[in-house]
Amino acid sequence: MTRDERLNNINTIVAEFCGKFGCRVSRQGEFCYIEPLKMVCYELDFGHACRMNREFMASVKRWKPQIKLNVFVWSLLHELGHCMTWGNFDDEEYERIYKKKARIWGTKATLPYYRLPDEMAATKWAVEYANTHKAEVKEFWEKLLPEVDALFALLRKG
Ligand SMILES: [Zn+2]
């Protein structure tokens, strides 16, 4: 199978999972959520080393996950969490939050970022969902992992 076929398989599995929440997916760019489109963007970065992942994982642990998941799955659940908690904040609150985000992006600090109310709400939703849907999340991950392994083996071969 080619790299693109593997990427398509991965995208199908991710799209099927996110589709259950009424979200579509894009593998362009970085992890993010775009509200008017109900679009979850993801990237295939499984590294645990970078500071952002470490601080993100610390923010996940605050909500006491009862299941061990890869940072990719937590990131995806977090983006779905933005969709599921979008209505928790009104336009005025989002305006305030996004002003803060713009300042934080300038400094590249990630710790205050994950403490913003919408980020905390998304992560809290992610952990609560994982805790109450362990079988679904595990099934998703077990479906995805062989495809990802195969893709990375292909990429290593060059
Ligand atoms: Zn977020």
Image (cartoon, rainbow, N blue to C red):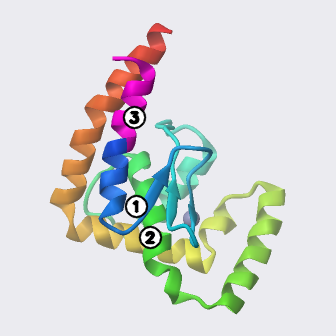
Give the quarter of the image for residue 142: top left
- Mark 3 to mark 1: distance in Å? 20 Å
Identity of the residue drawn at 46% across and 13% down: 156
140 within the magenta span: no
Residue bearing the label numbered 3: 8
Give the amino acid at mark 2: Gly
Give the quarter of the image for residue 23: bottom left
Give the amino acid at mark 1: Leu
Q: Residue 34 carries which label?
A: none
Does label 3 or label 1 sit earlier along the sequence? 3
Residue bearing the label numbered 2: 81
Give the quarter of the image for residue 104: bottom right
Secondary structure beneath disc 1? helix
8 within the magenta span: yes
- Mark 3 or 1, closer to the camera: 3
Q: Does the residue labelled 2 lie within 8 Å of ligand 1?
A: yes
Residue 155, x across and y down, in percent: 47, 17
Magenta region, residue range: 1-11
Give the amino acid at mark 3: Asn
